[in-house]
Image: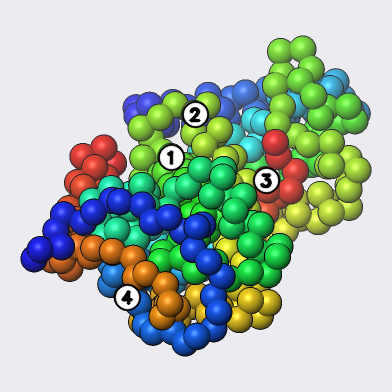
Amino acid sequence: MSSRRIRNLAAAFSLACVTTAVTYAETLEPEDSIVARRAVMRVISLNFAPLVAMAKEEIPFDAQTFRTNAERMALVSSMPVADYFVDGTDVDVGEAKTEALPEIWLDWENFSDKLETMRREVADLSVIAQSGDADALKNQVIETADACKDCHDAFRR
Amino acid sequence: MGDWPPSTERLDWYSVKPDDAQGAEPLYVWDAPVRLFHWLLVVLVTTSVITGLAGSQAFTWHERSGIAILALLLFRWLWGFAGSTTARFTHFVRGPRAVAAFVHALLRDRPYPVAGHNPLGGWMVVALLVALTAQAGSGLFADDEVFSSGPLADRVGNATSRVLTSFHGSNAWVVVTLACIHIAAVLFHLRVRGENLVRPMITGRRTWPRDRARPGLRFAPNWVAALVLVLSVAAVLAALAHFG
């Protein structure tokens, strides 16, 4: 089992724990909400990194990995991520560290739009992944990356 | 080649009397390497700004452009010590008295002919070189944690990379601001003082008042410049191949 796969599993496990908590709680505690959103982004990042490497032709294109990872990204990004940005979590809470800027809450509509854009791009990525069209996928990886970056530039420290 | 190595003797610019408009003749001030450096830098910095703003799609070209700028800057730093008279830092990096005298002449609307960078422009050259070197250097270690990462980003720790990434983002605007001030100053010289600084940067020649002593400028042979440039490019590529 590769170390990447172990890391993938570990992140998925912590996410599973968090999402279980979500099922039972209406709103998360501030500290938990930071852990939750970071876990979501971590899992998306872990799955996205190999696709970026393929788009940049740093590793060989592999249609199967593309499908699997894009599907995972689509699933995870469909979670109610906005709910994990609980009021007052623009600063570290307890053990949970955050890089979220207060602008998220000051400009919530814009933040939600960017979150929605990311979801749409990731959903497109998983649809295109079914086709296995390498060129179309490279383009969609770039679109998805720009959606991630656009939000980070605006709302991350 | 009796003009090699070039002399670094300073001209007593600010004791020169104002131009009485008794005619002027051409004076060769910028060697080909400096002119080529300047215009290549214009093209590459423009490319870097555009590709930097364009997102992931343009990252490959942003990276290439940055590496080319790094090699070009290394050449210019070396040329500032080993090049022709007007390319040398010892020639154009002037003290506060020279800068004050130059500003005084500007305020009095008096001519102040200089063979090379004027005392204020010299500091702008230094500022641009420092800012651009910091920009290209930090880009090597930058990483947006999504798609784009500099060729040496993996060589430093996460915390270091975060700091350099943030610096790369804000210093870009320092570079753009300096470039705008630089262009504004050139336009000021053209429109307000009637001095065309662009033509000499293309032809190498400026006009020099006949009634003034011609400065003893020395010019390095172009093959030396070509050698320094080849070495600069090789050094940058070798460093990237070794550490990247």
The quadrant of the image that shows the C terminus of chain B is: top left
| Residue type at tag 4 | Tyr
| Residue type at tag 1 | Phe
Residue at 80% over, 24% down = A91
The residue wearing badge 4 is B28
Mark 2–mark 1 CB contact (< 8 Å):
yes
Along the line of sight, the residue nearer the viewer: A137 or B198: B198
Q: Quadrant of residue B175?
A: bottom right
Check the image and name the residue furthest to the left. B1
Residue B160, image x and y in percent? 49, 28
Q: Chain of mark 3?
A: A
Q: The residue tagged with tag 1: helix, strand or loop?
A: helix
Q: Are marks 1 and 4 on the same chain?
A: yes
Q: Chain of mark 4?
A: B
Q: Quadrant of residue A146?
A: bottom right
Is residue B186 in view from this perspective?
Answer: no
The residue wearing badge 3 is A152
Question: What is the distance, in whole Å, between disc 1 and disc 4 at their CAs?
Answer: 41 Å
